[in-house]
Image: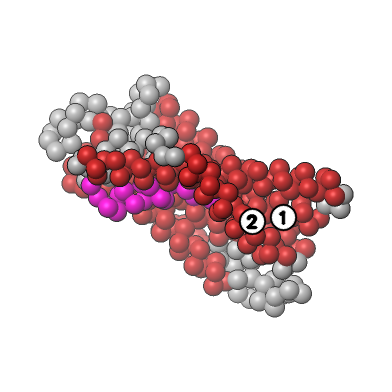
Amino acid sequence: MQLTGNDANIKAFDTTDTDFQTTASEKKILTILLGVGVLSLLVATFFDKNVTNAVMDQNSIFGNVFQNYADQGAGIVLFAAFEIIAWTIWRRVQDDVLRYVMTIGALAFAFNQMLAILQDMLSYTYSMLNNLSKGIPMGVANNTSAVKNYPEVLRWGLAVVLTVVLSFFFYNWLQSKSDADIRYLVTAALVGIAVVFIAQTTIGEMKSLWGRFRPYEMTTVAGNTMSEFTPWYHLNGINGHNSFPSGHTMSGWLFLFLVFFVPRGNISAQKKMTIFGIAMGILTAMSRVRIGAHWLSDVTVSSIIVGLIIFMASRLLAAHFVEPTK
């Protein structure tokens, strides 16, 4: 095992490793998760309406918390990726003018992602508080997209503060990394950007093509009449409705990609981040069904698609979710 000069617990990582193979534990976990996904989709094929009837509650604290604050996986992956790229440029580019221009440009992309993250969080929060003030369920009219119902100065102020603080963290964190670590992290950052783009494009295009009505858009949820219900395998075409598959679930699962920003020798952090990413994907999916924003099949298909995209990306990186000890 080759160790960096900065940290005896962190090994240098070589993305050209020809001995890379999927581990037995990865195969086992992948099989289990895919098995659960297929079983969930089978149940949803016949009982989508029944599941929604049993669990939907737009006043659910669990559903609202995850709706408001768990839809940020994509933005966080992109923010971290641009921060890594920015400070790697600062470290490696020798020409002062070029270094400043390129670093500031990458940081501007990171700042833009922070603005997008805060837009979702603030809009959902303000909508929830507005609903509570009117005595209606917290999640009503708060499921589809973010709206500008908050002070812009608040969003921009928070974005500036958070970007400055986190940029300071990323700058110092990367200073302690070896050249081999930096090469790996930059590769992970570029793959992360591609993963977010592919996931968002895939889920977004499917949403438009399927044109599926959401549970809360049904004539009634408590009774037997669901006049606009269609099964998950039925394409309605572009009609302005976009329940299938779940975008929030996609973003929840993208938290799992953050494990590849963990140094490859830090096994403990890799385990914790993997557990965190899987938990965020599952809990976000459950919350969307609970709040009536999605059917069980919506969140199941999104989970399968994004999970497989992340797994394929990990093979491209030649990085394990948890590196095997030698």
Using the rendered view, name the quadrant where residue 250 is placed: top left
Q: From the viewer's perspective, is residue 272 above or below residue 186? A: below
In the shown orientation, is residue 126 left or right of residue 256? left
Nearest the viewer among 263 and 175 is 175
Residues drawn in magenta: 59-78
Asked whether, in this view, residue 116 is left or right of residue 282, the answer is right
Q: Residue 139, can we see it?
A: no
- Residue at 51% x, 63% y is 273
Q: Nearer the viewer, residue 105 or 21?
A: 105
| Mark 1: amino acid | Trp
- In this rendering, the count of numbered labels is 2
Q: Nearer the viewer, mark 1 or mark 2?
A: 2
Q: Quadrant of the C terminus?
A: bottom right
Identify the amino acid type marked 2: Ser
The reply to whether callout 1 and callout 2 are in contact (CB within 8 Å) is yes
Picture residue at 51% right of the left edge, 68% below the top: 271
Residue 311 x %, y %: 54, 52
Residue 74 in picture, x, y percent from top left = 52, 46
Lateral position of residue 274 relative to residue 57, left or right:
right
Q: Residue furthest left?
A: 223
**Scheme by which the image is coloured:** secondary structure
